[in-house]
Image (cartoon, rainbow, N blue to C red):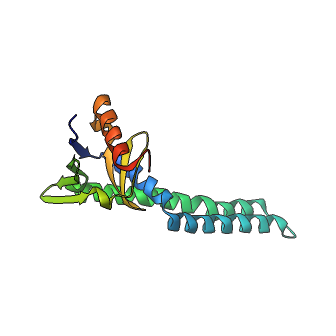
Amino acid sequence: MDDSFNIKQDLSLSELYKVNLIFLFRNKKYRRIYYFILIGGIVLTFSEFLSSKPHWINAIGTFLIGVFFPLLFVVAGTLLLCVIFYYIKPSSHKGSYVFNQWGMYKIIDKAEYSNPWKNFTRWEETRSFIFLYISENNAHVIPKRNLDKEELDRFKRFLVEKFGLFS
Protein backbone atom coordinates (compact mmCIF):
# COMPACT_ATOMS: atom_id res chain seq x y z
CA MET A 1 0.00 0.00 0.00
CA ASP A 2 1.38 3.38 -1.02
CA ASP A 3 1.48 5.74 1.97
CA SER A 4 2.10 8.91 0.03
CA PHE A 5 -0.63 11.34 -0.95
CA ASN A 6 -0.39 14.27 -3.31
CA ILE A 7 -3.41 16.52 -2.69
CA LYS A 8 -4.22 19.75 -4.45
CA GLN A 9 -5.43 22.74 -2.42
CA ASP A 10 -7.46 25.25 -4.37
CA LEU A 11 -9.95 26.89 -2.06
CA SER A 12 -12.74 28.83 -3.73
CA LEU A 13 -13.89 32.12 -2.22
CA SER A 14 -16.91 30.45 -0.61
CA GLU A 15 -14.70 27.69 0.85
CA LEU A 16 -12.23 30.26 2.16
CA TYR A 17 -15.11 32.13 3.80
CA LYS A 18 -16.53 28.93 5.30
CA VAL A 19 -13.15 27.90 6.71
CA ASN A 20 -12.59 31.34 8.25
CA LEU A 21 -16.02 31.33 9.88
CA ILE A 22 -15.36 27.86 11.28
CA PHE A 23 -12.09 29.01 12.83
CA LEU A 24 -13.58 32.28 14.02
CA PHE A 25 -16.46 30.66 15.90
CA ARG A 26 -14.22 27.90 17.30
CA ASN A 27 -11.76 30.42 18.72
CA LYS A 28 -12.40 30.70 22.48
CA LYS A 29 -11.34 34.35 22.71
CA TYR A 30 -13.71 35.50 19.97
CA ARG A 31 -16.55 33.39 21.35
CA ARG A 32 -16.10 34.89 24.80
CA ILE A 33 -16.14 38.42 23.41
CA TYR A 34 -19.28 37.67 21.40
CA TYR A 35 -21.00 36.03 24.40
CA PHE A 36 -20.12 39.06 26.54
CA ILE A 37 -21.71 41.39 23.95
CA LEU A 38 -24.69 39.03 23.60
CA ILE A 39 -25.30 38.88 27.35
CA GLY A 40 -24.96 42.67 27.54
CA GLY A 41 -27.57 43.08 24.82
CA ILE A 42 -29.97 40.69 26.51
CA VAL A 43 -29.52 42.40 29.90
CA LEU A 44 -30.15 45.82 28.35
CA THR A 45 -33.23 44.50 26.57
CA PHE A 46 -34.71 43.06 29.79
CA SER A 47 -33.84 46.21 31.72
CA GLU A 48 -35.90 48.15 29.19
CA PHE A 49 -38.86 45.83 29.80
CA LEU A 50 -38.50 46.23 33.56
CA SER A 51 -38.42 50.02 33.45
CA SER A 52 -41.42 51.97 34.74
CA LYS A 53 -42.60 52.81 31.21
CA PRO A 54 -41.31 50.14 28.85
CA HIS A 55 -40.98 51.20 25.24
CA TRP A 56 -41.18 48.25 22.88
CA ILE A 57 -39.32 50.05 20.12
CA ASN A 58 -36.44 50.89 22.47
CA ALA A 59 -36.34 47.29 23.68
CA ILE A 60 -36.21 45.93 20.13
CA GLY A 61 -33.58 48.51 19.16
CA THR A 62 -31.46 47.61 22.17
CA PHE A 63 -31.78 43.93 21.32
CA LEU A 64 -30.72 44.55 17.72
CA ILE A 65 -27.76 46.67 18.76
CA GLY A 66 -26.60 44.21 21.41
CA VAL A 67 -27.25 40.94 19.63
CA PHE A 68 -27.84 41.21 15.90
CA PHE A 69 -25.32 43.87 14.87
CA PRO A 70 -22.26 42.20 16.45
CA LEU A 71 -23.13 38.99 14.62
CA LEU A 72 -23.68 40.89 11.37
CA PHE A 73 -20.37 42.71 11.92
CA VAL A 74 -18.51 39.43 12.40
CA VAL A 75 -20.09 37.70 9.41
CA ALA A 76 -19.85 40.69 7.04
CA GLY A 77 -16.37 41.64 8.26
CA THR A 78 -15.11 38.10 7.69
CA LEU A 79 -16.61 38.10 4.19
CA LEU A 80 -14.98 41.43 3.36
CA LEU A 81 -11.58 40.26 4.62
CA CYS A 82 -11.89 36.99 2.68
CA VAL A 83 -12.75 38.82 -0.55
CA ILE A 84 -9.81 41.18 -0.11
CA PHE A 85 -7.43 38.35 0.76
CA TYR A 86 -8.73 36.13 -2.05
CA TYR A 87 -8.10 38.74 -4.75
CA ILE A 88 -4.93 40.37 -3.37
CA LYS A 89 -3.04 37.12 -2.66
CA PRO A 90 -4.69 34.49 -4.86
CA SER A 91 -1.71 32.13 -4.69
CA SER A 92 -1.86 31.85 -0.89
CA HIS A 93 -4.81 29.44 -0.93
CA LYS A 94 -3.81 27.50 -4.03
CA GLY A 95 -1.07 24.92 -3.83
CA SER A 96 -0.44 21.28 -3.20
CA TYR A 97 0.31 19.01 -0.27
CA VAL A 98 2.37 15.86 -0.18
CA PHE A 99 1.77 13.62 2.83
CA ASN A 100 4.02 10.68 3.56
CA GLN A 101 5.35 8.70 6.53
CA TRP A 102 7.67 11.57 7.52
CA GLY A 103 5.03 14.32 7.51
CA MET A 104 3.69 17.02 5.25
CA TYR A 105 5.31 18.96 2.44
CA LYS A 106 3.41 21.99 1.10
CA ILE A 107 4.10 23.97 -2.04
CA ILE A 108 2.42 27.34 -2.58
CA ASP A 109 3.46 29.54 -5.47
CA LYS A 110 7.23 29.93 -4.98
CA ALA A 111 7.29 28.93 -1.32
CA GLU A 112 7.84 25.46 0.11
CA TYR A 113 6.99 24.35 3.62
CA SER A 114 7.44 21.08 5.45
CA ASN A 115 6.30 19.83 8.82
CA PRO A 116 6.93 16.43 10.46
CA TRP A 117 4.02 14.53 11.99
CA LYS A 118 5.31 15.19 15.51
CA ASN A 119 4.36 18.89 15.09
CA PHE A 120 0.71 18.07 14.34
CA THR A 121 -1.66 17.88 17.28
CA ARG A 122 -4.82 16.36 15.80
CA TRP A 123 -7.05 16.06 12.76
CA GLU A 124 -10.74 16.68 12.22
CA GLU A 125 -13.15 15.91 9.42
CA THR A 126 -16.13 18.06 8.47
CA ARG A 127 -18.56 17.63 5.61
CA SER A 128 -16.30 19.53 3.19
CA PHE A 129 -12.82 19.57 4.70
CA ILE A 130 -10.16 17.74 6.63
CA PHE A 131 -8.31 19.96 9.12
CA LEU A 132 -4.81 19.01 10.22
CA TYR A 133 -4.03 21.07 13.33
CA ILE A 134 -0.58 22.29 14.29
CA SER A 135 -2.02 24.33 17.17
CA GLU A 136 -5.44 25.03 18.66
CA ASN A 137 -6.32 27.73 16.10
CA ASN A 138 -4.00 26.87 13.22
CA ALA A 139 -4.70 24.09 10.78
CA HIS A 140 -3.96 23.03 7.24
CA VAL A 141 -7.17 22.73 5.26
CA ILE A 142 -7.67 19.87 2.83
CA PRO A 143 -10.75 20.22 0.61
CA LYS A 144 -12.35 16.77 0.41
CA ARG A 145 -13.66 17.47 -3.08
CA ASN A 146 -10.08 17.15 -4.37
CA LEU A 147 -10.00 13.47 -3.44
CA ASP A 148 -12.03 10.71 -4.99
CA LYS A 149 -13.88 8.40 -2.58
CA GLU A 150 -11.26 5.66 -2.60
CA GLU A 151 -8.36 8.07 -2.09
CA LEU A 152 -10.28 9.90 0.67
CA ASP A 153 -10.87 6.60 2.50
CA ARG A 154 -7.17 5.70 2.17
CA PHE A 155 -6.13 9.16 3.41
CA LYS A 156 -8.45 8.93 6.43
CA ARG A 157 -7.05 5.48 7.28
CA PHE A 158 -3.58 6.99 7.00
CA LEU A 159 -4.55 9.79 9.43
CA VAL A 160 -6.09 7.30 11.86
CA GLU A 161 -2.81 5.40 11.77
CA LYS A 162 -0.91 8.62 12.57
CA PHE A 163 -3.26 10.20 15.14
CA GLY A 164 -6.03 7.79 16.05
CA LEU A 165 -9.67 8.36 15.28
CA PHE A 166 -10.30 12.15 15.35
CA SER A 167 -7.61 12.82 17.92
Q: Quadrant of residue 154?
A: top left
Residue 14 x, y percent position in the rendering: 36, 46
Comparing 47 with 20, the one in front is 20
Evaluate whether residue 54 shows in this view. Answer: no
- In the displayed image of the protein, which residue is found farthest to the left? 110
The answer to whether 32 appears left or right of 74 in the picture is: right
Residue drawn 35% across and 50% down?
Answer: 16
Q: Quadrant of the N terminus?
A: top left
Q: Is residue 81 above or below residue 167?
A: below
Residue reaching furthest right? 52
Q: Visible in this render: residue 79?
A: yes
- Residues 48 and 21: in front is 21
Q: In the figure, is residue 48 to the left or right of 150?
A: right
- Residue occupying image coordinates x 72% and y 68%: 44
Count of all numbered marks drawn on residues in the image? 0
Percent coordinates x, y for residue 30 in the rendering: 51, 66
Image quadrant in which you'd find residue 113? bottom left
Relative image position of residue 118 (x, y in whole percent): 31, 59
Looking at the image, residue 55 sits to the left or right of residue 42; the answer is right
Residue 37 located left or right of residue 159: right
Residue at 20% of width from left, 58% of height from top?
Answer: 114
Residue drawn where x is 56% and y is 68% of the image: 33
Q: Indicate the position of residue 71 as horizontal and vertical percent values.
A: 55, 58
- Does residue 16 lie above or below 52 as drawn? above
Above or below, 125 relative to 139: above
